[in-house]
Amino acid sequence: MKMTFAEAGILSSEPDEAEATPPVHDPAPAAVATEAPQGPLIDPTLLRFATEARWRRGRHEQGGGFPPDAVEAWRGLAADLDRYLLRPLPQTPLLELVRARLTVEAEWDYDQRRYGEPPADLLSLVQSRAGRLSTRIETERAIGMALEARPTLLAAPLRWPVEKAGISSPFGVRIDPIDGSRRMHLGLDLVAEQGAVVEASARGWVVRAGPAGGYGLMVEVRHPGDLTTRYGHLSEILCAPGDAVEAGQPLGLVGQTGRATGPHLHFEVWKGGLASDPLELLSTDRVAGIPTPPGVASSGGPR
């Protein structure tokens, strides 16, 4: 999914972020986007689960084993995923499936690091749902290739800017977490620990590095092929304008600068003057604590 400024109705999801010069020349009109998401969504369930999971990890001791409330929550999520995967393929969009799998992987990894070894039956339960999501993703990608539909979803030229990060807010229209207004979110929010290293998603050149309004400390990288990536809310910047960077090269550290409610990376992708959903260009093959079950192929593309 790509969106112009005219379609979005605003420059970004966060008013103060408009202070940063956009990588395009299109003006930002005054109207606010009113587009409703298409089809049934699993995103609200996953976002609620991730929020509650972070709250649980704050209440329980390190290494004390999986607490009963965490086990119950994972069983509930497995049941929600079972119902979701009963839907026909047209009602489970590819990007929605990718968000679901990545959220499950990231939260499972966080819980294991907090609580230790999970019960065997719970491990099997979570692995099987992750495997079913992977299978559905592969099926939809294969169908997309056969029909030559949505080609941008099939290539994954960008690597993930933060390892093992959970998705706290996807690209698209949302309720602003600070002022409660309905507005367009032109990036992907990746929750990670304060100080986690943020890496370049592809080879390119740093064109901006410093304070940028609501973005806080931000790095902007221009890549070949009229592609631009942005990395916002950093706590520290590890590069300078004019630097040539390679994929995986450190750009900064995760923080909470600017208009942010907690430590995370606000990651944007612009292609040909259009704001794009980063998940369309990021690799779907990201290891985050759940091994790919035997017989399930992993998605291709660089990491």
Image (cartoon, rainbow, N blue to C red):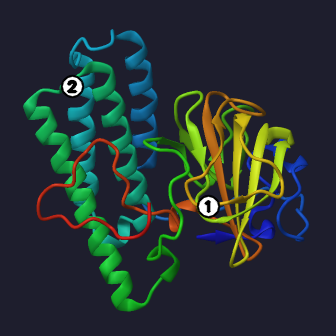
Q: Position of residue 40 (x, y in %)?
A: 41, 58
At 38% across and 90% down in the image, what residue appears?
Answer: 147
Mark found first going from the N terminus, 2 or 1: 2
Answer with the quarter of the image where residue 285 lies: bottom left
**Disc number lying in front (2 or 1):** 1
Q: Where is residue 30 in the image (x, y as percent from the top left)?
A: 89, 58
- CB-based contact (under 8 Å), mark 2 and mark 1: no
**Disc 2: which residue:** 71
Of residues 24 and 73, the one nearer the viewer is: 24
* Helix, strand or loop under label 1: loop
Horizontal side, residue 11 vs residue 132: left or right: right
Residue 54: x and y in percent read 44, 24
Residue 216 percent coordinates (x, y): 79, 37
Residue 205 shown left or right of residue 54 in the figure:
right
Viewed as shown, does residue 141 lie left or right of 268? left
Q: How crowded is mark 1: few (under 14 residues within 10 Å), some or many (20 or more)?
A: some
- Residue flagged by tag 2: what amino acid is it? Val
In percent of the image, x 36 and y 36: which residue is there?
Answer: 107
Q: What element carries label 2?
A: helix
- Give above or below for 90 relative to 124: below
Q: Spatial distance from mark 2 to mark 1, Cα to Cα?
A: 41 Å
Which quarter of the figure is the N terminus placed in? bottom right
Q: Which residue lies furthest to the bottom in this view?
A: 147
Residue nearest the observer in this picture, 2 or 114: 114
Residue at which label 1 appears: 246
Dividing the picture into quadrants, the one containing residue 121 is top left
Q: In which quarter of the image is residue 52?
A: top left
Inspect the image, locate mark 1, and give the three-letter code of the amino acid beneath it.
Answer: Glu
